[in-house]
Amino acid sequence: MTREAAYCFAADLGGTKLAAAMADARGRIVAELTEPTDQRGAAHVAEQIAACADKLAQAVGIEVTQARHVMVGLPGAIDPRTGRVSLTPNIAGLEDFDILGFLRGRFGPDVAIENDVNLSMLGEHALGCASRCRNAAFLALGTGVGLGLLIDDKLFRGACGSAGEIADLPIGRDPTTQMLSASGTFELEVGSLAIVNRYRRQGGTAAATVRDIFRLLEQGDEVAASVLDTTARWVALAVVSLQSLLDLELVVFGGSIGVRPELYERVRRTLPALFSRPIAIAPSRLGDRAGLIGAAWAAAQTLRQNLEPA
Amino acid sequence: MTMPAPPPPVTSVTRQLSRRSVFEALLHRSPISRADLAKVTGLSKQTMSEVVDAFGQQGLVRQVGRTSGNVGRTAVLYELSPEGGHVLGIDLGARRLTVALADIAGRVLAEADEPTDSRGGAWALDQIARLSDRLARDNHTHPSRIRSIVLATPGVVNPKSGAIEMAPNITGLGHLNVVGLLGEKLGSPVVIENDINLALLGEIWHGCAQNVANVAFLALGSGIGLGLFTNGQLVRGENGAAGEIGYLPIGGDPLQAASRLQGCLEYQVGATGVLRRYREAGGSEVESVMQVFERAQVGDPIAAQVIEETARLIGLAAAAVIAMVDPQLIVLGGSVGARPDFADQVARVLLQLSPRPVEIRTSTLGRRAGVVGALSVALSRLHDAFFGVAELAAALPLPPPAHRSARQ
């Protein structure tokens, strides 16, 4: 197949929405769509992904078989040795569902799955604010927390694909003095639920979501400001941890909470008091499309390798 | 009009590759006959013989006897000659200086250590030169035969400037051009690498982390340090400061001055931190962390509590490493970290903390880890200088320790 006739299909699966795109062999997205994630569990979600590919192929005017490489981002750790997905609390049944097998059954062998935050890191590395970096991280702060790592110009996955499981970072209330829980120490301080609970604990009543807290902040709500100060401090401590272990050039802030200047500017102001060397942080340039763009870019890269004679 | 491109130098690369594969076979399979060399390398007998003869003229190989097969003629056996070149590994610690000499085949010929000159700086460099010279002389090795030298030192070696930064325990090193001065004194190029990184490479070459692709080495002694090895490479970070685990904001107030200066974690778990906590908790007068361990063993509850708290903090630090880099194995090293009783305590804390259990081992090389790692890098560099082929990015694999012990 020639380069002109070859496309790739990219998807970024989240707990609430599924984004999908058809891209050309250079990774440029030619059509994309977003849908609410099917809440009936893994098997339905897998069908939904395949259906998105059909819709996009039709929109572009190609056969779906022209999508010669497929990359799907998932909110979980993927063991590079087995393809097994773990740590995916947001999509019911995904850990026990052979999503890679399903996708290969539909699209053929050229399918890969990757952690969604890793793909966001790749997106920012390819086209976003980390394009000149060799060592960087993508810190996703939203419902949950996640981290994608770029070390020496390559994605860093660790021995079992669990590198960057920042939710488990022991930064937060001392984890040796309390019961273990399904979500990690750090996530218990900065996940969206933790932020809302913090607001309530401090006597706030008007907020049901983190978005509400940001709105109240604009209106001068002091509790909202204090809650974000505390949250930013925990995030800054995680960034210091990251920096002391890995010495990065840039930490990109993403996710619905991470991209808010009200948060990352607070983190930026906190950092100098905590670490003697400067730490560069920046908001994601690609926003909530980072994962999808990274998936398309990674798929296209593999596609070109497959098309070129060895 | 453009000139036609010159033909690629095929013969030269081919010859390089042949030399490299014969050398590799000698490195890993000595003693070996010419027939077996040809078999292993896949080279024609003639090419292989040309290479072996050339190696002989260069002093790279020597005969070590004959096969004792009972069928047919016996064959001459070859091995790498110690005359082929030597390497020096140096571990410059705050308190001890260790130097080791090895030959091109990775056989450790001699090793010596003494207390580091407490005046530091130029005195320490003089001391290194003196000890290295003595080691070479005692082994009848002319210093000019030492082709590759690697120095392990605490602190951050900036990969861009070559300067040693953040080595507070050895005075006067930060202002010296250590690479230049030492190279001049020893008559051979010197490469500097962080001591923890080298201890990690030592454990991978000869110690408890052989054949493990993703390893974290956590050293606890007078200070705390971390080395990370993943997919065949050290993780160095953007400015060579990866693994500065002492700066983890764990165990104290990260906003206090000591945390910012010395590192929040190191302020608690470094030797001075352990002694300070023991004193503040009402412990009796002690001078070293080892004494605190001794007190704990004879029933001093304050000492036991201080050690338990140290193990808890190291467990938390290990949990942070697991969350961030997902290693297959964590090696505990350093004078405190390598103690099996302490490692057991850390492992218990981790079991309680981390959803993903990671194997923990204690360093098997102990104090020698750094110098063994320095030798391994010096050796790889020597091999690469002799047999590196630009087309092959990967370094020649080092000989396993079994090879070395079989020949002693």
Image (cartoon, helix red, strand yellow):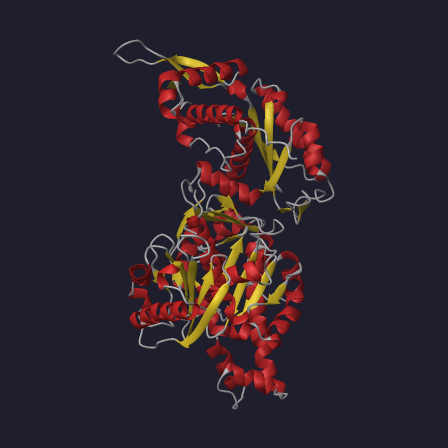
Residue B322: tell me if it is visible. no
Q: Position of residue B70 (x, y in %)?
A: 26, 12
Residue B196 occupies quadrant? top right
How many marks are shown on the rendered structure?
0
Residue B129 occupies quadrant? top right
Task: Give the vertical position of A200 relative to A95 (above or below).
Answer: below
Q: Nearer the viewer, residue A309 or B122?
A: A309
Q: Which residue is at the far top?
A: B73
- Quadrant of the snapshot with the N terminus of chain B: top right
Residue B68 occupies quadrant? top left
Tell me which residue sits at (52%, 81%) in the image. A210
Q: Position of residue A3 (x, y in %)?
A: 46, 54
Residue B296: tell me if it is visible. yes
Q: Position of residue B321 (x, y in %)?
A: 48, 56
Q: Which residue is at the far front?
A: B1
Q: Which residue is at the far bottom?
A: A206
Q: Position of residue B10 (x, y in %)?
A: 51, 27
Q: Which residue is at the far right?
A: B175
Task: Give the vertical position of B95 relative to A117 (above or below).
Answer: above
- Quadrant of the snapshot with the C terminus of chain B: top left
Q: Nearer the viewer, residue B397 or A69?
A: A69
Tell me which residue sits at (46%, 79%) in the image. A193
Task: Give the vertical position of A11 relative to B121 (above or below).
Answer: below
Q: Nearer the viewer, residue A289 or B340?
A: A289
Tell me which residue sits at (52%, 33%) in the image. B380
Tell me which residue sits at (38%, 24%) in the image. B42
